């Protein structure tokens, strides 16, 4: 990935916060993301380590992780209706 | 399908001894140590939680030769925020396949999502009943999502397929 540098005076962005990604949306969909320099450094190091084959897990979003935890824990699953099963 | 599925064994591990008593090991290394000291059999009995739940069976087994099926777990969306549910419905997440509330098709009373990271194996003896079916487009989409989630690099086979197709076209002309 190439890096394009712009002067802070030329753009208006929210202040980057360590440990946080600011996702800019357009029409309800992710359009751009703002990360702080520590996260950029980590991203570039990971890119160097993984090259083209970045493990899928790296891109799993917070919501997907929440759904996964719910699926694995069985906290939010349909209840089996035994009476309906017998009535089939 | 409705099936009974076990949760993944994780620490602390509960193991049943030959006499029926339960031993608890905080880590897998402690369990391995007990096995090494012949306190626990190598082929031991795990105690794990299980639940009857809907799963998506990923494979056909028309011969019946392979009794285990790869399957994915479903979860409802009730515990997500309104915004999260809306995004899942819009199909914004590569690891989720949204199933709308359609009892006639899916056989479930509420909307659900298939989590492609929840791969599990289900033995045919653990399957209770058919709940519903995915259509062919959904199965195709699920396959693509699953390949990505499993880090399966399909570029080589796709490239070979394209080359073979082009070569067939060239020879035909």
Image (cartoon, rainbow, N blue to C red):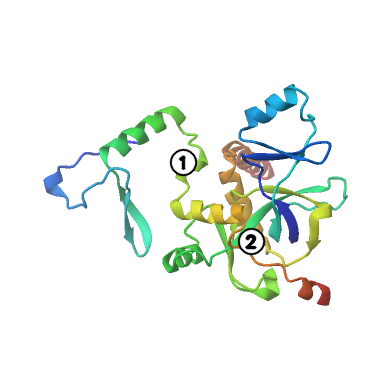
Q: Circle 2: is it few (<14), some (14-19), or many (20+) Cα within 10 Å?
A: few
Quadrant in the picture for residue B114: bottom right
The residue wearing badge 2 is: B137
As helix, strand or loop, the secondary structure at mark 2 comes to helix
Q: Position of residue B28 (x, y in %)?
A: 64, 32
B12 above or below B62?
above
Give the percent coordinates (x, y) of residue A2.
31, 36
Q: Residue at x 34, y 55 (%)?
A: A31
For mark 1, what is the residue? A58
Q: Is residue B115 visible?
A: no
Chain letter of disc 2 in the image: B
> Residue B41's spot in the image, x, y percent?
80, 30
In this rendered view, identify the residue nearer to me: B98 or A27: B98
**Contact check, label 1 and label 2, Cβ < 8 Å:** no
* B115 up-or-down from B98: above or below: above
Indicate which disc residue B17 carries: none
Q: Identify the image quadrant of the N terminus of chain B.
A: bottom right
Q: Tell me the quadrant of the picture where the C terminus of chain B can be found.
A: top right
Residue at 48% across / 36% down in the picture? Answer: A54
> Hey, which residue is sitting farthest top in the picture?
B37
Q: Position of residue B61 (x, y in %)?
A: 82, 51
Of B112 and B47, the residue lying toward us: B47
Q: Which of B173/B40 is in front?
A: B40
Q: Is residue B65 left or right of residue B136?
A: right
Note whether residue A15 is visible: yes
Q: Quadrant of residue B52?
A: bottom right
- Disc 1 residue crowd, few under 14, some 14–19, many 20+, Cα 10 Å: few
Q: In the shown orientation, is residue A64 left or right of residue A8? A: right
């Amino acid at each position: 990935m190439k890096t394009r540098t712009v002067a802070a005076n030329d753009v208006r962005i929210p202040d980057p916060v360590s440990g946080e990604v600011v996702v800019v949306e357009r029409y309800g969909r992710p359009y751009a993301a703002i990360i702080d320099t520590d996260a950029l450094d980590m991203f570039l190091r990971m890119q160097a380590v993984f090259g083209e084959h970045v493990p899928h897990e790296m891109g799993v979003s917070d919501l997907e992780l929440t759904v996964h935890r719910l699926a694995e824990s069985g906290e939010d699953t349909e209840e089996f209706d035994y009476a309906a099963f017998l009535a089939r | 399908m409705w099936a009974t599925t076990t949760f993944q064994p994780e620490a602390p591990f509960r193991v049943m001894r030959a006499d029926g008593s339960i031993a608890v090991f905080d880590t897998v290394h402690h369990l391995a140590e007990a096995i090494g000291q012949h306190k626990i059999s190598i082929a031991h009995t795990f105690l794990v939680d299980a639940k009857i739940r809907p799963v998506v069976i990923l494979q056909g087994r028309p011969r019946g030769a392979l009794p285990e099926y790869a399957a994915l777990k479903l979860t409802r969306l009730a515990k997500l925020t309104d915004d999260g549910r809306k995004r899942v419905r819009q199909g914004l997440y590569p690891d989720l396949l949204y199933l709308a509330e359609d009892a006639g098709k899916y056989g479930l009373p509420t909307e659900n999502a298939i989590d492609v990271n929840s791969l599990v194996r289900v033995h045919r003896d653990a399957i209770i009943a058919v709940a519903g079916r995915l259509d062919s487009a959904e199965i195709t989409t699920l396959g693509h999502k699953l390949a990505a989630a499993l880090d399966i690099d399909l570029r080589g086979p796709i490239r070979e397929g394209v080359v073979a197709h082009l070569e067939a076209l060239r020879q035909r002309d």
